[in-house]
Image: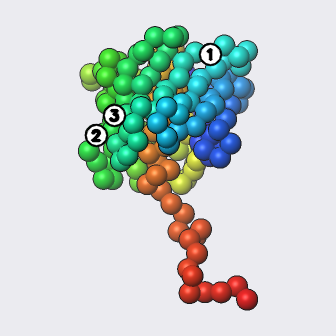
Amino acid sequence: MIYYIDAQSLHDTGVTVVKDHHNQPAYILNGKHGLANDRINLHTIAGQELGDIRQRSVGMSPRYDLTLNGHKAGSVKKLFGVWHEFVFVSDLNWLIFGNLLANEYHIYHGVKTVTTIAAVGAATSRTFQIDILDPRNVPAGLLVAAILDRWRFVHQTNPLSRRNPAYGLG
């Protein structure tokens, strides 16, 4: 099952519509993160809440708790990495390998692929294509993808948006 998340919209407005491979709305992600107890929620288009991912700590390596259907499904913690990310989701036993330069992530359970996440178009794209192989993993996969975006925004800055105070406009 292929889904698309507009990470820029989620980052800027706190809400985005997750679309399927037919470009039809499938889910709604809303919320924010960055401070302790901030969370991102996943809803069906009809409004039923499927789960959330709540930030439990702040800092260079924040911890998140993943809740599905009202029950804690796991904790997410970033491990070591400079150009490559390593993230572990306890209880689900998912290991996530990410390439910050290419904006690609692979989620594994043991040696089996659970999900692949990649930027659509150029490597600087803010839209992600998420390929989730098992329909039972869709809510968890979408919520985890939403916070992988958080670490990407922390590391990626646009050099064109920086202002040099030595130059004046008038």
Structural crowding at the residue carrying mark 1, measured as other residues with C-alpha within 10 Å and reported as few (<14), some (14–19) or many (≥20): some
Query: Looking at the rendering, in which quadrant would you find the C terminus?
Result: bottom right
Of pointers 3 and 1, the one earlier in the residue sequence: 1
Which SS class for mark 2? loop
- Quarter where residue 6 is shown: top right
- Give how far across and how far down residue 128 sits, in percent: 55, 39
Quarter containing the N terminus: top right
Q: Is residue 17 above or below residue 160?
A: above
Q: Which residue is mark 2?
A: 79
Q: Residue drawn 37% across and 34% down?
A: 63
- In the rendered structure, the answer to whether residue 70 lies left or right of residue 16 reads left
Q: Residues within 10 Å of mark 2 (few under 14, many from 20)?
A: few
Q: Is residue 2 left or right of residue 117?
A: right
Q: Residue at x 43, y 54 (%)?
A: 155
Q: Secondary structure at mark 3?
A: strand
Which residue type does callout 3 highlight?
Lys
Residue 168 in sight: yes
Circle nearer the N terminus (1, 2): 1
Instruction: Identify the residue under disc 3.
Output: 77
Q: Quadrant of residue 87?
A: top left
Given contact means CB atoms under 8 Å apart, are the residues at marks 2 and 3 in contact? yes
What is the distance, in whole Å, between disc 1 and disc 2 at their CAs?
29 Å
Circle 2: residue type: Leu
Q: Position of residue 10 (x, y in %)?
A: 62, 40
Q: CA distance from mark 2 to mark 3?
A: 6 Å
Residue 135: percent from the left, percent from the top? Answer: 51, 14
Q: Residue at x 31, y 30 (%)?
A: 88
* Mark-to-mark CA distance, 3 and 1: 24 Å
| Image vertical order of residue 67 relative to residue 88, above or below | above
Q: Which residue is mark 1?
A: 49
Q: Secondary structure at mark 1?
A: strand
State whether residue 13 is above or below residue 25.
below
